[in-house]
């Protein structure tokens, strides 16, 4: 039988995974699209039909399909108060979750 510290670690990891999965499942891609169109579309190509965007930044399709940008790394990046290359977005956790769901939907 596993020791108590190992069991606690397993339960803690499982709880964290369920919490993150629950957030992802509850994320609203439509709201994420609205956020992307408002805050991101000036520089990033956020939709397939978009006619403008900078060629110096990745598209949402590139970000969403990248193995380097999983949900956790995107969340950490978007939660940072200041980005050297981006405006201060000041998004709530829910908005970040929605935006990530929208970005990740482009990588499928």
Image (cartoon, helix red, strand yellow):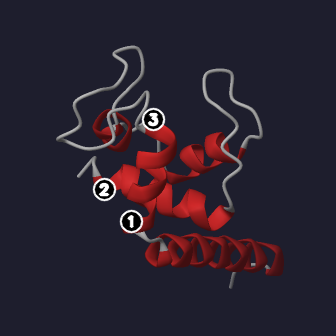
Q: Earlier in the sequence, mark 1 or mark 2?
A: 1
Is the C-beta separation of discs 1 and 2 under 8 Å?
A: yes
Give the number of the mark in front: 1 or 2.
Answer: 1
Tally of numbered discs: 3
Residue under circle 2? 105
Sequence-first tag of 3 and 2: 3
Label 1 secondary element: helix
User: 85 or 52: nearer the eye?
Assistant: 52
Tell me, yes or no, whether the two marked residues, 1 and 3, touch with CB atoms within 8 Å.
Answer: no
Q: Which residue is mark 1?
A: 29
Figure check: 22 above or below 87? below
Q: Count neighbours of disc 1 (C-alpha within 10 A) and say few if under 14, some if 14 to 19, many if 20 or more.
A: many
Residue ID at (55%, 73%): 23
Residue 78 sits in which quadrant?
top right
**In whole angstroms, how far apart are the C-alphas of marks 1 and 2?**
8 Å
Residue, x 37% and y 66% (percent of image)? 30
Looking at the image, is 91 positioned above or below residue 4? above
Q: Residue furthest top?
A: 56
Is 84 drawn above or below residue 99 in the view shown?
A: above
Q: Which mark is residue 68?
A: 3
Q: Residue at x 61, y 28 (%)?
A: 86
Residue 61 location in percent, x, y?
Answer: 28, 39
In the image, residue 20 lies at what x, y percent?
58, 70
Instruction: Decide which of tag 1 and tag 3 comes sooner along the chain.
Output: 1
In whole angstroms, how far apart are the C-alphas of marks 1 and 3? Answer: 21 Å
Q: Secondary structure at mark 2?
A: helix
């Amino acid at each position: 039988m596993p020791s108590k510290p190992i069991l606690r670690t397993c339960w803690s990891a499982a709880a964290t995974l369920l919490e993150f999965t629950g957030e992802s499942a509850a994320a609203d891609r439509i709201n994420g699209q609205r956020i992307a169109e408002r805050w991101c579309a000036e520089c990033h190509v956020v939709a397939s039909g978009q006619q403008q965007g900078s060629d110096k930044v990745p598209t949402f399709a590139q970000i969403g399909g990248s193995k380097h940008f999983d949900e956790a790394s995107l969340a950490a990046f978007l939660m940072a108060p200041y980005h050297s290359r981006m405006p201060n977005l000041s998004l709530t956790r829910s908005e970040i979750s929605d935006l990530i769901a929208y970005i990740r939907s482009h990588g499928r």
